Image: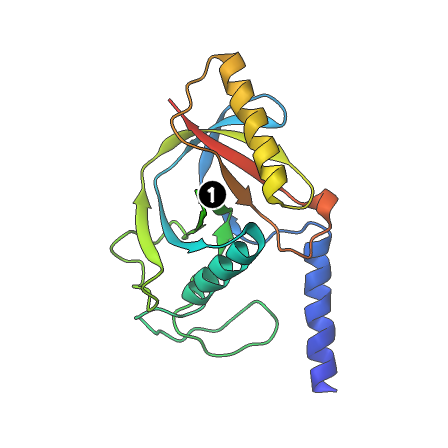
């Protein structure tokens, strides 16, 4: 019975995510201009946990996500046990860092780079040191970013199409891009595609 209740509770929480309820804290930004599905934002400086893998999109995404998720779930050197609030099954963990949105991903050649934005209370010096040497902690300076928002399932082809759309829009509007495009995802994979919040980001002058 206890296992059944745990399963039902987990399914209930998953159902909340399916219908678009997001509990993760977002990276802090200010909207400078709003053009509907495209915005110009000013992002504050942030600290990220970052890793890279050489693989195709599907395998690379899974490997990178799992590696970073282990880090924020306690695979770090502080090992301070705290209560786990989500998912429903509770267990003592090493220091567990709250997960924030978005999960940022970009491709350089055959290498996928994925970053988790750490909560604002963590600085570069206070972020726990990863136990996995493939996870790096980096300080990202504040920056101006053009963002194209869309829904649907994430795929490499979709990211490329939306990246071209945003790049073309920037040229037509007279903006100068200073970075390649990257994908930002806000929802778990079981969220219904039409309810998902996906974005493409390009840094601009």
Q: Residue furthest bottom?
A: 1
Q: Is residue 107 left or right of residue 140?
A: right
Tally of numbered tags? 1
Q: In which quadrant will I find the N terminus?
A: bottom right
Comparing 108 with 13, the one in front is 108
Relative image position of residue 21 (x, y in whole percent): 66, 51
Specify whether residue 27 is in view: no
Q: Is residue 54 left or right of residue 165?
A: left
Relative image position of residue 10 (x, y in whole percent): 68, 70
Relative image position of residue 47 (x, y in whole percent): 35, 48
- As drawn, 127 above or below 184: below
Image quadrant where residue 131 sits = bottom left
Q: In which quadrant will I find the C terminus?
A: top left
- As drawn, 73 above or below 56: below
Specify whether residue 103 is in view: yes
Taking the spot 48% from the left edge, 46% from the top edge, the residue there is: 105
Q: Is residue 176 left or right of residue 26?
A: left
- As drawn, 96 above or below 139: below
Comparing 190 with 106, the one in front is 106
Relative image position of residue 99 (x, y in whole percent): 48, 57
Disc 1 target residue? 106
Taking the spot 47% from the left edge, 63% from the top edge, the residue there is: 69
Comparing 160 with 83, the one in front is 160
Q: Crowding at label 1, few (<14), some or many (≥20) Cα neighbours within 10 Å?
A: many
Kind of element beneath mark 1: strand
Taking the spot 57% from the left edge, 37% from the top edge, the residue there is: 199
Taking the spot 28% from the left edge, 52% from the top edge, the residue there is: 124
């Amino acid at each position: 019975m206890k296992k059944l209740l745990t399963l039902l509770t987990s399914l209930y929480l998953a159902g909340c995510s399916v219908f678009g309820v997001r509990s993760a804290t977002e990276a802090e930004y200010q909207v400078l201009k709003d053009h509907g599905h495209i915005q110009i934002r000013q992002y504050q400086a942030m600290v990220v946990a970052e890793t890279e893998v050489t693989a195709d999109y599907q395998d690379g995404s899974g490997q990178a996500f799992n590696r970073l998720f282990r880090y924020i779930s306690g695979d770090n050197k502080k090992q301070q046990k705290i209560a786990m609030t989500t998912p429903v099954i509770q267990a003592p963990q090493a220091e567990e860092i709250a997960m924030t949105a978005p999960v940022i991903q970009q491709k350089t050649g055959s290498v996928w780079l994925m970053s988790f934005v750490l909560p604002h209370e963590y600085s570069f010096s206070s972020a726990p040191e990863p136990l996995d040497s493939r996870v790096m902690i980096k300080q990202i300076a504040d920056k101006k970013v053009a963002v194209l928002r869309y829904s649907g399932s994430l795929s490499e082809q979709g990211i490329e199409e939306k990246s071209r759309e945003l790049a073309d829009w920037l040229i037509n509007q007279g903006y100068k891009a200073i970075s390649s495009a990257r994908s930002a995802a806000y929802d778990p994979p079981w969220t219904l595609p039409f309810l998902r919040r996906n974005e493409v980001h390009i840094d601009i002058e």
